[in-house]
Amino acid sequence: MRRTDLAGTRFGRLTGLWPAGRYRREIVWACQCDCGRVRAVLRNNLRTGNTKSCGCLNRDQATQAATQRFRKHGHSYRDRKPTPEYKSWQSAKERCFLKTHPKYCNWGGRGITMCDRWKDSFEAFLADMGRRPMGTSLDRFPNNDGNYEPGNCRWATPKEQASNKRQHGKRSDLLAMTSLSLRSSRATSPWLDSIVGMEEV
Ligand SMILES: [Zn+2]
């Protein structure tokens, strides 16, 4: 066995430099890690693949795993409770697609939908919308008759939402009146609700 047999050889992130002595009868090699550190590593651990870095690989993987866990759960659930963003996303989705939702008629039932990107991925929704500021809810803006999609949604305060609905109110009023005359005029009419009521969060 040549003493230089590992020099220049790569083991994961490590590259053998020179034999650096022995540790409990085992040969130790000085290795350069990709991260810049030089470490003494048991030759045997290099050859078997037990050691692939100065320790930075494990650290990176742990960080990555933690990041993934956070991405997966941290943004949708915190302390086992859905986050505000997740609640908004979920209930908007339900209003559009869940036919048994009590207010489906105001959203999905009148053709309002959620784009596929958001429908299929809370992460995509979160990436586009960002965190929900306190006291706001998901508002379709500028087009109150438009869909839940990037470019037509914002986090808005009740005041902002009300003025948004007033701006579009004329058209909705007409629709509502037509609808009311065609349908029953009960106070809980979905059309009336869509003008006066706020979207739930
Ligand atoms: Zn390293």
Image: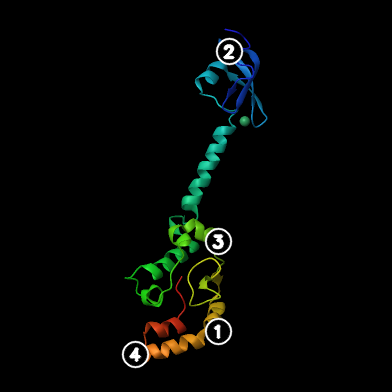
Q: Is residue 199 visible?
A: yes
- Say which of 90 and 118 sits in front: 118
**Label 1 – label 3 distance at C-alpha:** 25 Å
Tally of numbered tags: 4
Q: Which residue is mark 3?
A: 128
**Label 2 – label 3 distance at C-alpha:** 54 Å
- Which callout, 2 or 3, points at the residue further toward the start of the chain? 2
Q: Kindly indicate the quadrant of the structure image that contains residue 156.
A: bottom right
Give ligand 1's quarter of the image.
Answer: top right
Q: Which residue is mark 4?
A: 182
Q: Which residue is mark 1?
A: 167
**Label 1 – label 2 distance at C-alpha:** 79 Å
Q: Which residue is mark 2?
A: 27
Q: Amino acid at mark 3?
A: Asp
Q: Amino acid at mark 4?
A: Leu
Taking the spot 50% from the left edge, 61% from the top edge, the residue there is 125
Badge 4: residue crowd in 10 Å (few <14, some 14–19, many ≥20): few
Mark 4 Cβ and ligand 1 under 8 Å apart: no
**Label 4 – label 3 distance at C-alpha:** 39 Å
- Which callout, 1 or 2, points at the residue further toward the start of the chain? 2
Q: Amino acid at mark 2?
A: Ile
Mark 2 Cβ and ligand 1 under 8 Å apart: no
Find numbered disc 1 in the image and state the secondary structure of the residue it sits on: helix
Find numbered disc 2 in the image and state the secondary structure of the residue it sits on: strand
For residue 101, above or below residue 119 = below
- Which callout, 1 or 3, points at the residue further toward the start of the chain? 3
Residue 81, position as x, y percentages in the image: 44, 58
Q: Is residue 83 visible?
A: no
> Which of the two discs, 1 and 4, sits closer to the camera?
4
